[in-house]
Amino acid sequence: MSSDKEPSKIGGDAKYYQGVVQESVGKALGNEQMQTDGTAKKLEGQSEAEAAKVAGQQKKEKVIGNVKETTGSALGNEQMEAEGRERKQNA
């Protein structure tokens, strides 16, 4: 996962499975370096996929908070508006 782009579930899964294959081939061939590289790629992919999941949940919470805040404002419901604002800020 590079720092200049957002994590990707698809990209993370692809790295994970590439790592699984590389690790397995390295093990089958007795190539410890290939096996180690595969393990590292597998873990990197797993981390990226998990980071993407967390980022997606945060975006979802912000959208829900925004909807709740806007709806509360439109209905004149100050409590709903405040709850939405708080949900956005805590995402």
Image (cartoon, rainbow, N blue to C red):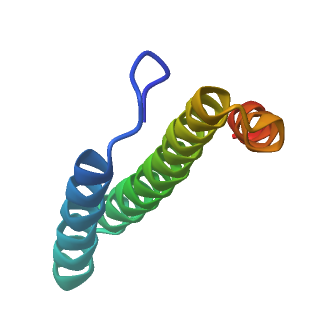
Question: In the visual, does 90 lie left or right of 29?
Answer: right
Q: Nearer the viewer, residue 13 or 37?
A: 13
Q: Position of residue 77 (x, y in %)?
A: 74, 38
Question: In the visual, does 75 lie left or right of 14?
Answer: right
Q: Position of residue 14 (x, y in %)?
A: 20, 55
- State the residue lying farthest toward the front: 76
1 up-or-down from 61: above or below: above
Q: Position of residue 74 (x, y in %)?
A: 58, 28
Q: Residue at x 49, y 46 (%)?
A: 60
Q: Quadrant of the N terminus?
A: top left
Q: Where on the picture, by quarter, is residue 8?
A: top left
Q: Nearer the viewer, residue 63 or 43?
A: 63
Q: Nearer the viewer, residue 14 or 63?
A: 63
Q: Residue at x 27, y 62 (%)?
A: 19
Q: Residue at x 53, y 51 (%)?
A: 57
Q: Residue at x 22, y 78 (%)?
A: 24
Question: In the visual, does 17 lie left or right of 83?
Answer: left
Q: Quadrant of the C terminus?
A: top right
